[in-house]
Amino acid sequence: MKKTLLTTASVLMLASGVAQAEDKTLTISVYAFAQDEFKTIVYEPFEKKCGCKLVVETGNSVERLAKMEEHKASPVVDMAVVSMADALAASRKGLIDKVDTAKLSSFNKLYDIAKDPNGDGMSVGYTFYATSIVYRTDKMKIDSWGDLLKDDIVSHVAFPNVTTNQGPPALYMLGQALGTDAPDLKTPIEALGAKKDKVVTFYVKSSQLVQLMQQEEIWAAPVGRFSWAPFTKLGLPLAWATPKEGQTGGMNVMVVTKNSKNRDLALEFMDFWLSTEVQTKLAEKLIDSPANAEVKVSDEVANNITFGADTAKSLKLIPSDVALDYRDKWLSEWNSKVGQ
Amino acid sequence: MFQNRAEGLALALPAALFAALVFLVPVVLLLSEGFRNADQWTLSAYVDFFSQPLNRTVFLRTLKLSALVTLVAAVIGYAAAYAIVSLPPGAKGRMVGLVVLPLMISPVARTYAWIVILGRTGIINQALQAIGLTDEPIRILFSETAIFIGLLQLFLPLMIISLISALENLPRDVVPAARVLGAGWLSVFWKIILPLTKEGLVIGGTLVFTGSMTAYITPAILGGSKVLMLETLLYQQVTVSNNFVAASVIAFILIVMSFAANILLKRIASARRSGK
């Protein structure tokens, strides 16, 4: 069924692609986020520069990876942006190639953590984000991830579902607060499960949190820094916590599809995206925190994104192999302790 | 009407082909996924599904909430429909218009409105606090209660409309006749109105039950991932786990439950008739 749907989708996509094709066409697969801004800042300027046509596919990473797997023999997508863990998953399935960093003039400008996030040479980080807790300063003080489970706080908390990008990192930090570093996340899931009835909701989309915060339905929630800006516009006394266990987060990376016929063009596009100019513009629009260390932004912008070498170094990221190998265990543990 | 049968069939063929191609084939392909394991036919996906406690909980919750919404919609629906058909024609038209009005507003907008109404600072909590029933706001959002309220509001008009058309076919004199002969209101409803309007109840009940069971937006927004229903579980299986087999199993269960509800309601209706 999946095959049929994907084949139909690809035939339709190919048909529309062929109709619009110019001499050179590069197909990219990206998150469906802020596409209007990406079009103005990245896609259109690149098309002008290379004299080529960009075909942009969007969707969540599960759908996009499934599509790449389906077209493994004859890839449709030339380059994709995915999470670190998904890049490792794609690498294990033989869907992507080593990134020829010699062809990326911006490569040496990247923060060290972005140069080869999975240590296998198969991806390059283009943005990263911190994950911490946004909270009402007039109602509570958050000094530790463990504070989220305190009796007077937990009934005003929205915690990310384990299936979201923020879920496992937030659980990992909760585990640290509970004195464990174990990658199985059993302890924090159990602790959260014991208070599941009190937690307001286990959110799936962070966009929902702004409304819940505005309605005073919640007073605290672990979120990615990219969600922070809308909270600052609510006019509520809100702060970004700096828990003693530190902040966690995630990184999104670029990958090149194996057997892509447009490998050089894909690398040219990646280089353009990683350039100081483009990364600065994306940061100024508060879309992506820059992985390029040469990017300079105003204090106001810096406060709204994840910015700077020190921040980049301090983030406690879950290694991709752990995320991949434990994903199913986390889900079944979550379903048995929290999900019911 | 046609000179020969072939002519009629030929005219129906394009629509039949279209329906088969875009509806039947995909549905059969999707459903067959749940019965296949590599090269052989098997029920193992169904056994796996029901062996997991979470899935059983979600299945029973979906069944319970859908049944409850249908029951309450029937009770409120009969009262509202009876009141509406008793009105003079002009007022009746206006009331029917009011009942239909919510159906013209997107379920997303209607459900988002409930987030505001049911929230800690929403009007329900404000009213409860104002009349002194509670000191602190009570939690309604992200609970079965919130889903129940959302679904009932979403599908009640379908029940009322079905019952209005059934009640309009009720012979005008039977209720006053029964009352004159000394029957109480409960007796009138149980022995006269219900048997004579059962078709409307079966149609309305099937629409409300099936709609409640297969609604996605309302449970997703008002229940979240804390109160999963079969539809929200199906979405999770596809988008998070990429598990099309589990999605196929859930889809099949939903279809079977819809048919079962319809058959059950018809049985109940015919049992009352044969029992008379």
Image (cartoon, coloured by chain):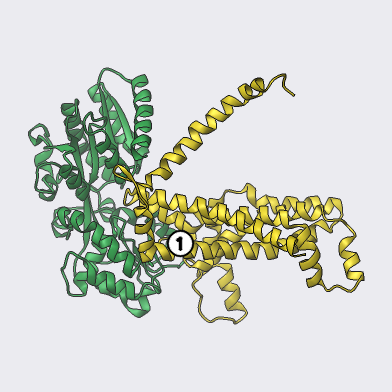
Chain colours: A green, B yellow
Residue A49 as seen in the image, left or right of residue A216: left
Q: State the residue in front, A301 or B256.
A: B256
Residue B255 as seen in the image, left or right of residue A134: right
Residue A183 in which image quadrant: bottom left
Residue B149 in which image quadrant: bottom right
- Above/below status of A165 relative to A29: below
Q: What residue type is labelled 1?
A: Phe
Q: Please state, as top left, top right, bottom left or bottom right, where the N terminus of chain B lies in the image.
A: top right
Residue A148 as seen in the image, left or right of residue A263: right
> How crowded is the residue under tag 1: few (<14 C-alpha within 10 Å), some, or many (20+)?
many
Q: Is residue A295 shown to the viewer in this render?
A: no
Instruction: Find the residue positioned furthest to the left.
Output: A102
- Above/below status of A26 relative to A274: above
Q: Where is residue A282 in the image (x, y as percent from the top left)?
A: 27, 42
Per the image, the residue denoted by label 1 is B59
**Residue at horizontal 22 percent and vertical 66 percent from the top:** A185
Q: State the residue in front, A187 or A307.
A: A187
Q: Where is residue B139 in the image (x, y as percent from the top left)?
A: 49, 72
Q: Position of residue B119 (x, y in %)?
A: 51, 67
Q: Is residue B230 shown to the viewer in this render?
A: yes
Q: Which chain contains the residue that carries disc 1?
A: B
Residue A315 as seen in the image, left or right of residue A12: left
- Please count the marks in the image: 1
Q: Where is residue A24 in the image (x, y as percent from the top left)?
A: 25, 21
**Residue at horizontal 30 percent and vertical 65 percent from the top:** A334
Element assignment for label 1? helix
Q: Please state, as top left, top right, bottom left or bottom right, where the C terminus of chain B lies in the image.
A: bottom right
Residue A35 in which image quadrant: top left
